[in-house]
Image (cartoon, helix red, strand yellow):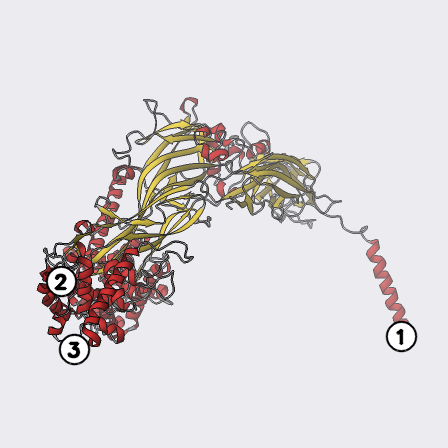
Amino acid sequence: MAFWDRFKKKGENVEGATFKAGYAAGRVATGASNAGSWVKSKYNESGGARSAVAGAAAVGGGMILAGGRRAKEAVKDNYSVFFFMLLALAMHMLDWGTGFQRSTNLASVNWIFWLQILFAIVAYAVLSFDLRDDWTNWIRGFIPFLIAALVAYYLPLATNMTPAIGSLQGMNIVLNPMIHPVWIYFGVIFFKEQGLARAILLCLIILWSGYVLFGFVNEGNNFGKQMIKPGDYKNFVQFFVDWFDGAKRFISIVTTGVYKGVSNAWNETMYQATGGDMYYTGQVDSKAKEKLGVYIQDLKLASPQFYDDEPVSVWATLEARTLDKPIPINVACYTYDNKNKPLLMRDDIPKISGKLTPTNYFYVFKEDQEDIECFFDRLPSGMQTVGFKADFEFQTEAYFRTYFMDVNTLRSYKTENIDILKQFGITDTNPVAIYTNGPLMIGMQIKEPPVGIGEYRTGTSSGDIVANKISMRITIDNMWEGKVKDIKRLILMIPKGMNIISDESSQLKCGEFVFEEIGCGDVPEIGERCDDSINSIYRLKRGDMTNSSGTLSNTQIDKFKYISCPIIVSPASVLGNNPITAKYFKVLVDYNYSLDKTININIISTQVGGTGSNIGTTQFTGEEAKMRFNNSISDATYLKIYTQKEGDANRDVETKYSKLVLDRSKQAEVSYFLVKSIIKVESNWDPAASGNGGDSLGLMQIKKDAATSNSCGANYDKPELNIPCGTKVLSVLMNRMKSQSAPLNAKNIAAGYKGGISAVVKSKNCDGKLNYECEWDDSAHTVPNTGYAATREYAAAVESQYNDLVSQIGASA
Amino acid sequence: MKNLTLILLIIGLVSFSGCNSGTGGTPKYNPYTGSKGITMSFAKNSPPQEIYEGQTFNVMVNAVNEGAESVKNGKMLLGYEEGIIEPEQPDQSFDLYGRAEARDKGEQKIINFRAKAKKLDPQVEVMETLMSVTTCYQYRTKFSGDVCVDTDPLKLRFAEKNCAAKDISSSGQGAPVRISKVEVEMIPHQDQGKIIPSFKITIANGGDGIVYNKDKINQACSAAEISKDDINTIYVKEARLGQDYYLDCKPKREGYDIAYVKLKEDESVIRCSYEPGIDANTAPFTAPLYLELEYGYSQTITQTALVKKEVY
């Protein structure tokens, strides 16, 4: 019988009982109120009948207990399903209650990860206790549990990184708590024939289908910042392209995360198993109210949507806080070249820099908050990533307090069974390093307090043992998402009377690191806080730690996780006059850190999907309707209208291409007069016209990127392609202007054609005017708006030409 | 009715006069009760719960001798964290009179340690620091209680006994170390005409401190080494039955003639007996048992404070 069948069936017919279903094995019953006593009593009651195994799991750091229950009873008890799910929910509530703590550094797993794994192992071990005769299947059967645990851990991370979930306005807040308790799946797997379970399964399928369908669209890490709006997707193709992109990215994130997490855990375990030092953790200074460090926050788009022919602007807030030492911060923003766009952001991928305002350099003395804006002239259509990067110097300090006393006195107290720490009112029996807030974690450890120092007698004078060596172990690790670029300085401050032991070559070595002894004068910025009379101070000699670029490689950074310093102690100096003395060990690290935060933007293409198709979907009325192609005028009448008078240059070109202009205007539903006016002003009907240093070509002076994004073809400078391309651009432009409530007339459309969509959005500086119309560049009207001067002239010229053409045909236009 | 009033008046007067004329006035105050020695407590807001770096502050300790023994040259030591606190004078001596028949309260003193908070390290906004005050002093426990020396434990004589040997329990003698129980045993002497009064005495540490050898008590308030032999060690200075019978107590420390007690789990037992024995023909009698113990005592009180950086 297949393992799973056996698993499901194993509850049957124990002691000849007649019960219906065979899912008793997994019948897990734990009630919030009666779990403990019930499980215990049932475990005893079940005796040898292990067919029904009940499990109970712990919540809030509690642990998993297990008990047995006769399958017969279990089947009768519909509530056992409920209890199991309640338990699963409670497990998840713990996760929820602690804020779904996940680091976006995927390789960095935390306690909840191990708790999920532990839950899976114990739950499975209990549920399948009597099936271990078939080990292969037994192990195979664990895989779903393991997957469930990994999903439980990584899913909140994934949804937090999936903007489409957030696009449903705060759905992450709902979804993370509500649909992620994967332990409910366990209940569903084992009890699916139950009505309640089936209903839950159905709900989950619906929710997950929705998630899978929409969740991957616009996948990125700017969760909650973007919205999918009606009209964002004009066709399903683009939707699925985005969906596939998101799904690919999601899978990559999860697989990479799992791989990195497992490999890190494995490496660490192996390191320790082969005699390596322990990884020590510290505790961030919980008493500090200030959130020290540099933070890039509130990344948001300047506009809800961007098109590929307009500038893209992304905002962020840079926050920095320090207590003593000022922080210099260099800020940059970037995007990836589409060709190099990686699945996961990597430093070695070439980037394109954006323009940053107001500045890319900040110097923070205490506290600062600055709104910064990143600006790109254009970004290609599709999913784009814009990142803000802040490089800054920072300092993290950690202190570790432990207690010392005379080793013989300590032994005397121990012999007398006296807890000397308790006697002296010391509750800090297992001290941990306290480190200041910031990107780095500093952990430290010295043997359990109180540390006995001195010489203790062994009974024979020659056999006295010297107990004056201790080992100070330090772990420095990166806890933020960014990267430690360089450890600039590492200073150890240990109590006076203690010294790092020099090796045979007279070097002061802590593992691979070589230190040098310095004095307070060498760290002047610490000033009066440094006291040579109570501290011995050591500084890390850089040696060959850095690579050719002057930064530390990842492997070099990893070495900082295991620093072990042998220290020799002078008891008299350390103990002073106190029976037990508290001493501080301090580590101060100056480093360069690079913080990176990205946001994904779906740049909408101005391509309208095939020649003339989908153009003109927006309904224009009134004056605006005049900007549409007027079908009431006959083709013959249209073709009589000229911008070039007899004898003017390029009159023949106009004659030759007027029919094409007419056809394309009709197709794009753009005013024939407007297209002709634009051609007149742009090129004066010279097909070989070239502007903007060769970037604008042809009759309608199409720019290269516009031609590319509109699929105008390689020879877009040729009138046969140039005119269709220009009319398409005009059509899209008019629709967009309409959506932004910009008045549609020849002058404004021409301004948009020349200056882009930003030229025809409402001005902040002049009431009732568009950007290009406003003569001022500030609200106080002191700075002239010179940026749109050319646009104003151009728009006026087109308007004049348009009016001239209209006047040729009379009122019917 | 008049007769009844007169009778009541007479009864009242007789009763009143009887009260005044008995044993000679109000009973004397007995200081040898309780199991406290010196008690310490921090004065209110001392040390302050929050101290700013660079600030000078006081650690004031209210010390009261609640025992029956006076303390001379006791020591009080401020425990502090060197990198954070800098005291002007970390140790002080004190004398404190104990309770006495004429004093129902022991002497009280405020002992002040003045200290300064050092500057905090860069990036450190606040640090919690532990301050402790340890006191070390010599003390004595004096026990006095009537015991019955039953010279006929086997009841071989017909004469009625004046008393019968019975155990004594006590809750304390005005000292942190107390004699909690005295069990009386009469052991036949090898010389058949005599009997040996023997006492099994239970001694306990009734306070919350540590008992030390009285001669090494100062080491408890210093970094000097303390041997295990000097911890939980109490010497029996004197053990006497009545005025004449000096008792021999065991165990004795090797090389010393003086008995000592080594507490284990805060309690221990010694045996004291009058080895020469008492004539068994003597009628059973009651006599005071007097014991005097000597030891050093140390206890600690602690208080945490936050040292803060003046950020803004």
Mark 2 and mark 3 residues within 8 Å of each other at the beta carbon? no
Is residue B205 something one can see in this rendering? Answer: yes
Helix, strand, or loop for circle 2? Answer: helix
Q: What residue type is labelled 2?
A: Ile
Q: Position of residue A435 (x, y in %)?
A: 41, 43
Mark in front: 2 vs 1 = 2
According to the picture, the residue beneath numbered tag 1 turns out to be B1
Q: Position of residue B80 (x, y in %)?
A: 54, 38
Q: Position of residue B13 (x, y in %)?
A: 87, 62
- The answer to whether A422 is drawn above or below residue A205 in the figure is above
- The chain letter under disc 1 is B
According to the picture, the residue beneath numbered tag 3 turns out to be A632
- The chain letter under disc 3 is A
Query: Quarter of the image containing the N terminus of chain B?
Result: bottom right
Same subunit: marks 2 and 1: no
Mark 2–mark 1 Cα distance, whole angstroms, equals 143 Å
Q: Which amino acid does label 3 sit on?
A: Ser
In the image, A279 versus A488, the foreground residue is A488
Mark in front: 2 vs 3 = 3
Mark 2–mark 3 Cα distance, whole angstroms, equals 22 Å
> Residue A723 has which mark?
2
Q: Where is residue A780 in the image (x, y as percent from the top left)?
A: 43, 57
Mark 1 nearby-residue class (10 Å; few <14, some 14–19, many ≥20): few
Q: Quadrant of residue B16?
A: bottom right
Mark in front: 1 vs 3 = 3
